[in-house]
Structures are given as C-alpha cells and as structure tokens.
Image: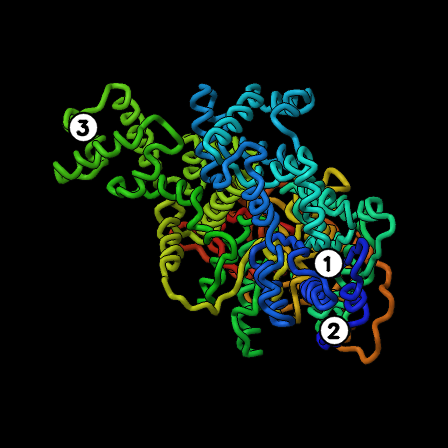
Amino acid sequence: MNTFLDELNPTQLEAVKHIDGPLMVIAGAGSGKTRVLTYRIAHLLNNGVDSFNILALTFTNKASKEMKGRIGSLIDGSEANNLWMGTFHSVFSKILRFEAEKINYPKNFTIYDSADSKNLIKAVVKEMNLDKDVYKPGVVLGRISSLKNGLVSVNGYKSSAVLQSEDSSRKMTEFSQLYANYQKRLFSSGSMDFDDLLFNTYTLLRDFPEVLNKYQNKFKYILVDEYQDTNHVQYMIIKRLAAMFENICVVGDDAQSIYAFRGANIQNIFNFEKDYPDFKSVKLEQNYRSTQTIVNAANSLIKHNKNQIKKTVFSKNSYGDPIKVCKTISDSEEGNVVSQSVFETQMNERCSFNDFAVLYRTNAQSRSLEESLRKRNIPYKIFGGLSFYQRKEVKDLLSYFRLMINPQDEEALKRVINYPVRGIGNTTIQKLLICSRTNNISIWECIENPLFHSNININSGTLSKLTGFVLAINSFKVQLSDDAYQLAEFVAKSTGLLGELNKDKTPEGISRLENIQELLNAIKEFSVKNKEQDLPIDLGTFMQDVALLTDQDNDKDDEKNRVTLMTIHAAKGLEFPYVYLVGLEENLFPSQMAIHSRQELEEERRLFYVGLTRAEKRIQLSYATSRWRWGQLIDCEPSRFLEEIDDSLLDWQFIFRNKQKAKPKTNNYKLNTNYSAKPKTAPKPPTPKFTPKNLTKVNQTRTRSGPFIDNSELLKENMLVEHERFGIGKILSIENKNGSKKAIVLFNDAGEKQLLLKFAKLKIIK
C-alpha cells in the first residue's frame, strides 16, 4: 500500500512517516519539499486519518493544485478532494462563509481585490476633502494592509501614539479617521478586502471560543508550506488552530525567506522550537536540482548569515562547470554578453530557449537585456510583468516625447493631456473629440487654434488649463534639436511626472520611479554614444530607435519557446537549466536601501542565495564597472556577495566588448585558470576566501588622473589615453575631415572604437 514511500531518501522518509506531534521540516533548495508534503498527506490518509481532518495551507493556488493532483495519483482521488487544501486566503474565506454572521457579515460577502480597495480609498479621500497627492490610494492601502497583517485594528491604531506619529511624519495626520471610514464603508457594503480575510478569521477564532473549538477538532492535522514566508496574522491563526492537538507540520527554508517587504516574518520559523518545545526537526539537505559546484557556491555564500538554522546542503549530481563571473564595462555590454552566451549555448547544446532565465534585482534592469536579446532576434518573455517599453510610466513619458515630435498624435495626446492631473477631465476630452471630428481636424488643432475654442463649449478655467498645456508642449518642441537627455530630463521634471512618481514610497512606486530613471539612462547613453560618433543626438532620433524596438512588442506570435526574464523575487520556486544573474554591484545588489542593518543585508544575501539555487546545470554571474544614474556615469564596485563565494568555484572573466571572450587581465582580479571542471575526487573543504584586495574599486585611475577635458589638439598617434567609459587605450590613428577630428582607439577593456575627439574628451596618460 505504501510502495510510494520507497521513492524517498532516508530524511524525506523520516519526515513523511512522522504522524503525531509538532514537526519542522527544513527543506533546502531543490530538496524535494513538495514531494515530502504530498507524500506525508498520502501517508496520513493511508494510516487512517480522515481527509476531512487535514488542513494544508500554501501560498499559491498553483502549489495547492499541484499537491492535490499528486496526492490523487498516490491514493483514492475522491479522498484528495475532501482535503481542506489551498492558500491562506481561500481556506479562511471558506471558514468565514460559514461563520460570517457571528461577526455581523452576510454569508455572501463580497471580496474586494486591490483595484476595488484603491477605488474605495479614492472615494473616502474625496469625501474627507483630503489631499489626494498625500493620501495616494496605493500608499494608503499598503499602510492599511501592513496594520491588518500586524493585527492592528482601527481602535488599536487610535490607541498607539507611535503609529500615529509615524503617519504624522508623512503628513498623513488624518490617517486614523481615513482607516476608520474605509472599514466602515467596507462593512456597510458587506465586503472584505484581502487582508480582512485573515484579520477577521483571527478575530472570529479569538472572540468565539465555540468556533475555535469547532475548527481545532476539525483540523487535527495541519500542514503549512513555505512557513518562513508567513506574516504575524497567519502565524497567530495557525498557532490557535493547532493548540489542541499540536499535530502541526511546517515546511520551509529560512535561507529562502525573501518577502519581508510583504510582511513576512522570518522569526516565525526561528521561534518554532519555543512554540513547541517537544518538536521534531528534520533537515532535507540533499539538492536534486543543481550541480555540486552551484550547491557549494550557495553554501559558501549563505554561511555569512548569522541569523540562520544551520544545515549543509549537498548534491550527488555531477560537479559541473565552474561559475563564470563576467566583468563588463557597462550595463548595455552586460546585456550583450548575456545574449551572446544564450545564443551560443542554445546553438552548441541544441537546447530550447525555455531552458534559459535571466534574473535581476529590479525590474528596471530588464531594459538593456531586452534590447540586446532583440538585436540577436532571441525571443523572450517578461515573467510577472510587462516589457520595459510597455510599462505605464515609461509609456507616459514616451507619449510626451511623441506629442512634442508630432502634435497630431491623438493617442499620445489623450494619454498625457491630464497626466499628471491638471484638471482636464474626460468630459472636456469628449468635447475636444467632437470638435475634432466635426471640423475634420486633429484634437491638437482644436486646442491650439483659438478660432475653434467657441465650438468646444468649455469654461474659462478649463480653457486656461488647455492653453497652459499647449504652451508647455510648444516650449518643448522648440528644443527638439537639443541634446536628447537634457530635453528628456527637463520634460520629466517640468511636467510633474517625476514629482508624481516620487510621492509613492511603496515598493511598486519605487519600481516605477526606477523605470523612469532607467529610461533617462537609456537616453543619456544614446546621447553620449552618438555624440562621440558624430551621429544625431536629438530626441526624435532616439524615438525612432525605440519605435523599432517596441514594434516587436506587438508581435502576437504564440510561440512559447522564449528566454525568461524576471526578478529574483519572481523566480522563487522555479528552476532552469541555464541561469544568468546580472547586476551584481554594490548599491544595486545588495540594494542601497538594504545595507543599513544586519537584518536587511541578510535578506539581500538570502535573495542572492535564491537566485543561485534556481540553476540546474550552469549559472553565470555578471556586473558592470559603470552605469548611468540620473545623467551621471558612475563607477560601480562588484557586489560584496561575489567576495563571499568560495573563489575556487569561480571562473573570473574579463569581457572584450567586440569579441565577447575571456581576456588575460593586468589588474588584480582573479582568473581561475587551474580549475578542474570535473574532478575525479570529492572537492576539498572550501579554502579561505580571496581577500578584499582582489575586489578593489574599479576604475581607480579615474579619480587620480584629473578631469576629462577636450585635449583634441594635443592628441597624437600611439599616445596612451583614458576614456570615461572605456578605460585606458592606445590611439591607432587620427584623421581630420571637414574640421572634425576622429580617432581610432584600441582600449584594453572595450576593444577598438572610433571616436569624435571634441566630444570624447580623452585624458592623456603618456
């Protein structure tokens, strides 16, 4: 009957066969966590436990569906259907449907999604005459969600001087009443938001002992997946439900706790021993996914976290290739290196594009990667998001550019005429459309030409706002021949778009601002590159280039064979044969916002660990020595996490810009040439790390050799020079055509370049 147990290794079997009492399963990456959960439930059923008495909680519907399907294949499928298995929200909403009347809700209560909740907040803010720029729906909803997940009710908030002080510092002095009114409106409409499903379940179990007793007796066996990702309210509900029998099994990995920004509390898994002193602990340490090299690298990294449950993950798979670490001169070059590697690997190993994933810390990093993949006609998909140039905030700013170049562009005009909000509502836009169609002219002509204003039938206040909008666009138009970056930055600031995005301090708001920053970075890079090569640097030329890129976004090809691009957060739980982890630089990964405390830094390290352990066969790491940030080319230092990986597992690569291959280096970065890819014996214990001197700050000479200035009159062939982006090189030849001097320079780092000298501003070394 239990023949499926023969498929388990000894530690998996130990976890599955444990029936009564608290159990904590620490499941390392790729260790068969889902198999253990499903087989444990099947084993419980085979040992006489009633399926109606089992509660299994997951974090995704996908995980729940997969587990239920596996259980059905192991035992009687009908019994699997009787399990209370699902996400926290789905299971607890089911309980609330049965018990809603006890907390004065109808059984058929409505569940508000985030869009519904934001619309309700907008309405309440308007009714209270609050500043909508301060009380932004996303910010307010995030704050309310955080409070509910921390079990802070409206009354609890009102009694907390600390919480009120926090919001007062954000100029949200009326937040207490806003929170109260929001909850009243939900209640009066017989509705709950997502967070209420948890908050109200806890309230129900706390205030109604008979209800608590009912579900404690019902759920004699409780299993919780991804326990390290539980928040406070989830933890408290689980603790109450399990209090009678304590037959609770939690499965998780503290090393993969990466959702603190969503309220996840890693202390829940650390405190399991305190909550259940007689608990049993089982550690699943065999990784079935990755090569020994990848596993060893992940182990050597995560051991630097002090706050962790000690375990030693191992693999019996092949040793695998050493991990390439690619040093590139820019983020665009990093994209080129990745796309070239994907192309070559796919051709040489005859694998599918589905086998590849490119992981990054922030969504904004996808831009350079997308452009590089497109140039090589490599199909890709953005997992859990939109292509860079399809993101709302990016399209908003691009629409301003489109309108400046072509005021007849109706779609661009409609998109930005009232964004950021300037008091030109939908009614006015409809009147403009009627004027346009009636007179067979564009909307722009309607609002630009006073002769048509009488036909529009709008009040003087709105007309003044339309006139102001026209003046703004026209003022931008006269600058179209100027430097693209300077104009783009001016438009982003003067329209209020940057200011609007900067108000939203939620993770989503920060991501949107980062996308605008990345768009401006792309324009700056375009401007500098074209200036040096004596090519047009105006915004119109840039938009032509973008149009060629974005045109591919309209391709409706349903081909699913595509490279996956995603953030590391989105990649958790997934695996790919080939993984590229990019942007490994200080202040990017780890994030600049996460280096001020040990707790934050350790979460960033766990995030890197998750990225490493997504790879099955091969992973490539990369970083850039320079990036554009708000119009400034900054030097970047390699991430501290690279230093923490056992250096014997790494193959340091220095990349030629043109040839895309390893190059012998004259700096002090290590290139591991003695590495045996497939040793016949087991690897020796990790050797001491290479010292920080091997990861010195890049481009140190830049700060020592003085400013970059126009030295074009002094430059000669065979001179040793330095460029701000490309580093040190030798002038091969100089030619003077029509008063414009051009030079061909062979750079140590970037290969051969042709530069317009009056813009290149080369420093003379000797």
The three-letter code of the residue at mark 2 reads: Leu
Q: Is residue 343 visible?
A: yes
Q: Measuring 26% from the left and 33% from the top, which residue is drawn there? A: 429
Q: Measuring 44% from the left and 35% from the top, which residue is drawn there? A: 492
**Cα separation between marks 2 and 1:** 55 Å
Give percent across and percent down for residue 285.
Answer: 79, 64
**Cα separation between marks 2 and 3:** 77 Å
Q: Which mark is residue 667?
A: 1
Indicate the colouring scheme: rainbow
The three-letter code of the residue at mark 3 reads: Ile
Is residue 697 or residue 110 the one in the foreground? 110
Q: Nearer the viewer, mark 2 or mark 3?
A: 2
Q: Helix or strand or loop: what does disc 3 sit on? A: helix
Q: Which mark is residue 737?
A: none
**Cα separation between marks 3 and 1:** 69 Å
The three-letter code of the residue at mark 1 reads: Asn
Q: Residue furthest left?
A: 439
Is residue 209 or residue 709 the one in the foreground? 209
Give percent across and percent down for residue 24.
Answer: 79, 55
Which is more N-terminal, label 1 or label 3? 3
Q: Which residue is mark 2?
A: 5
At label 2, counting other C-alpha atoms closer than 10 Å, the crowd grade (few under 14, some 14-19, many 20 or more) is some
Give percent across and percent down for residue 674.
Answer: 78, 73
At label 3, counting other C-alpha atoms closer than 10 Å, the crowd grade (few under 14, some 14-19, many 20 or more) is some
Q: Nearer the viewer, mark 3 or mark 1?
A: 3
Q: Which residue is mark 3?
A: 456
Is residue 401 or residue 455 the one in the foreground? 455
Which is more N-terminal, label 3 or label 2? 2
Give the quadrant of residue 78. Answer: bottom right
Q: Measuring 36% from the left and 61% from the top, which residue is drawn there? A: 555
Is residue 367 or residue 431 the one in the foreground? 431
